[in-house]
Amino acid sequence: MSAQLSHRETKALFIALADEELPAEKEQAVRSHLEECGECQKGWQSYSSTVLRLRKVEKEKAPPALTSMVMTRLKRQRRFGLKRLHLAHAQYRLPVEVLIPLLIAAAVGAFLIMSAP
């Protein structure tokens, strides 16, 4: 890779690097940045040690009752999703009849401000 990676790009690739999912070129670019940058190197050491600790933790299986409850709620949310979306404004106590004129006024005001000399 000809271009150097920035700190932000390098840190964004930590997940893929830990999971060994980077293409060879990208992995080499990340590793070369880590060799040159102490700040990113410290971040990588902290991140990779955390990942290693988490991988050592025993995985627990959820109790059947919890699994059943979660799946039931998911099905219910899918079934009533549109109704819930339609009623979402009710919890804020702002009727749609008030919201639409406010949005139109905001759009007109923004237009007037942008078109003013």
Image (spheres, rainbow, N blue to C red):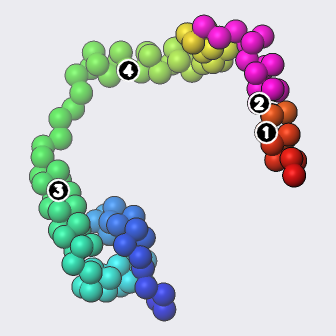
Mark found first going from the N terminus, 1 or 4? 4
Mark 1–mark 4 CB contact (< 8 Å):
no
Q: In this view of the protein, can residue 84 be seen by the observer? A: no
Q: Does residue 14 sit above or below 60 in this rendering?
A: below
Which numbered mark, 1 or 4, is in the foreground of this view? Answer: 1
Q: Secondary structure at mark 4?
A: helix
Mark 3–mark 1 CB contact (< 8 Å):
no
Query: Closest to the observer: 65 or 89?
Result: 89
Which numbered mark, 3 or 1, is in the foreground of this view? Answer: 1
Mark 2–mark 3 CB contact (< 8 Å):
no
Task: From the top left corner, tell me how far across and down residue 5 is, in percent.
Answer: 42, 79
Identify which amino acid the numbered label 3 is placed on.
Answer: Thr
Task: From the top left corner, tell me how far across and down residue 82 is, in percent.
Answer: 65, 17
**Which residue sits at x=18%, y=41%?**
59
Q: Residues within 10 Å of mark 4 (few under 14, many from 20)?
A: few
- Residue under label 2, please give it: 106
Mark found first going from the N terminus, 4 or 3? 3
Quarter occupied by residue 13? bottom left
